[in-house]
Amino acid sequence: MRSLDHPETGELQLDAILSALADPIRRQIVAHLAADPGAHACSAFNLPVTKSTSTHHFKVLREAGLIRQNYKGTSILNSLRTEDLEAQFPGLLRAVLRPTNRTPLPPVLDVHERD
């Protein structure tokens, strides 16, 4: 049986996770998996990129420890490592996936500005 390498829970690195989540396509994948838990084939994601670029995004997410990938026949199924991420970095996924509908902060005034 073929298998792919995944970091163990204790090996998850915050820098690698944040770097992987910096890309909007990868955040879209993670959001999809968070909204619909379970294992999904790569083809289930309607991504606006080529197949090779899509493969790259899934590899980055797997190597960072955000997703688990398993072979089922010729397909690779993807699932979010919610429990592992929550154990290592409590609240991180909730914070990253929270809608950004907050009121923007006012601009910071230059300390040299006068009234």
Image: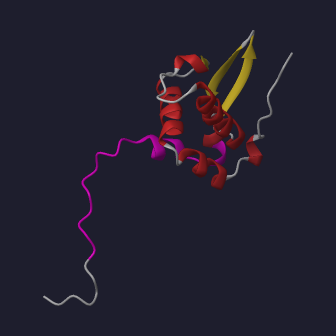
The foreground one among 57 and 95 is: 57
Kindly identify the residue that appears in the image at 62 percent across and 25 percent down: 79
Q: Any magenta on residue 31?
A: no
Tell me the residue at 21%/88% (across/down): 113
Task: Decide: is 104 above or below 69.
Answer: below
Q: Residue at x 45, y 40 (%)?
A: 97
Q: Describe the colour scheme in one phrase.
A: secondary structure
Where is residue 25 drawn, in percent x and y?
50, 37
In this image, 26 relative to 108: left or right?
A: right
Range drawn in magenta:
87-108
Residue 2: quadrant of the picture: top right
Judged from this view, the residue extending furthest toward the right is 1
Q: Determine which quarter of the picture holds residue 56.
A: top right
**Side of 85 relative to 49 (left or right):** right
Residue 104, placed above or below residue 64: below
Q: Is residue 3 left or right of residue 92?
A: right
On the rendered image, what quadrant is the C terminus found in?
Answer: bottom left
Q: Nearer the viewer, residue 111 or 53?
A: 53
Instruction: Please give the name of the residue rendered at 62% of the width and 47% of the height, measured from the top-left corner.
Output: 17
Q: Nearer the viewer, residue 91 or 63?
A: 63
Helix, strand or loop: magenta stretch: loop
- Residue 68, image x, y percentages: 69, 29
Q: Residue furthest top?
A: 73
Q: Position of residue 48 (x, y in %)?
A: 46, 29
Residue 64: x and y in percent read 68, 43
Q: Is residue 104 magenta?
A: yes
Quadrant location, the N terminus: top right
